[in-house]
Amino acid sequence: MFRTADIHEVLPPILACVLVWEMALPYVTTGAYDQAPPGVRRLFILGVPVTVTALSWWELSRLRRHHGPDTAHRAAPLTRPATAVHRAVAPASGVTPVQRSHSA
């Protein structure tokens, strides 16, 4: 969600839950879809928020499982594994190929 994981890795699922329930709340309180049967009305109003909440819980549990139980208390974002492009730009040794050829 708009690079919110750069701030903290648990922010996207939490923000998604808050926003989807905020959007559903007016429909719950105003009695929207009065012409629909009660079961269909509940499905229309609560289907999306419940689904997004379930997916967010799954994402949070996955973060906790793969990055440890202290995920929610980290001071910095999780580091992402380096791709081939990142390795070519910044080698693991910290020495660029030009520096390596001059220093050897």
Image: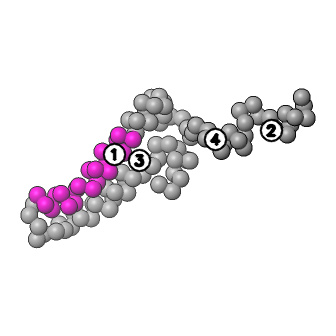
Residue behind mark 4: 84
Q: Residue at x 35, y 40 (%)?
A: 58
Q: CB of mark 1 within 8 Å of CB of mark 3?
A: yes
Residue behind mark 2: 96
Q: Secondary structure at mark 2?
A: loop
Residue behind mark 3: 13
Secondary structure mostly seen in magenta is: helix
Quarter of the rendering containing residue 23: bottom left
Tell me the kind of residue under disc 3: Pro
Q: Is residue 71 above or below residue 23?
A: above
Quarter of the rendering containing residue 85: top right
Q: Residue 86 in the image: x percent, y percent?
A: 66, 42
For the residues marked 4 and 2, what is the alpha-carbon distance in whole angstroms? 15 Å
Q: Answer few, some or many: residues within 10 Å of disc 3's Cα (few below 14, many 20 plus, some between 14 and 19).
A: many
Q: Earlier in the sequence, mark 4 or mark 2?
A: 4
Q: Secondary structure at mark 3?
A: helix
Residue 25 in the figure: left or right of residue 62:
left
Tell me the kind of residue under disc 4: Ala
22 or 71: which is nearer to us? 71
Q: Which of label 1 and label 3 is nearer to you?
A: 1
Q: Which of label 4 and label 3 is nearer to you?
A: 4
Magenta stretch: give its range: 39-59
Tell me the kind of residue under disc 1: Leu
For the residues marked 1 and 3, what is the alpha-carbon distance in whole angstroms? 8 Å
Q: CB of mark 4 within 8 Å of CB of mark 2?
A: no
For the residues marked 1 and 2, what is the alpha-carbon distance in whole angstroms? 42 Å
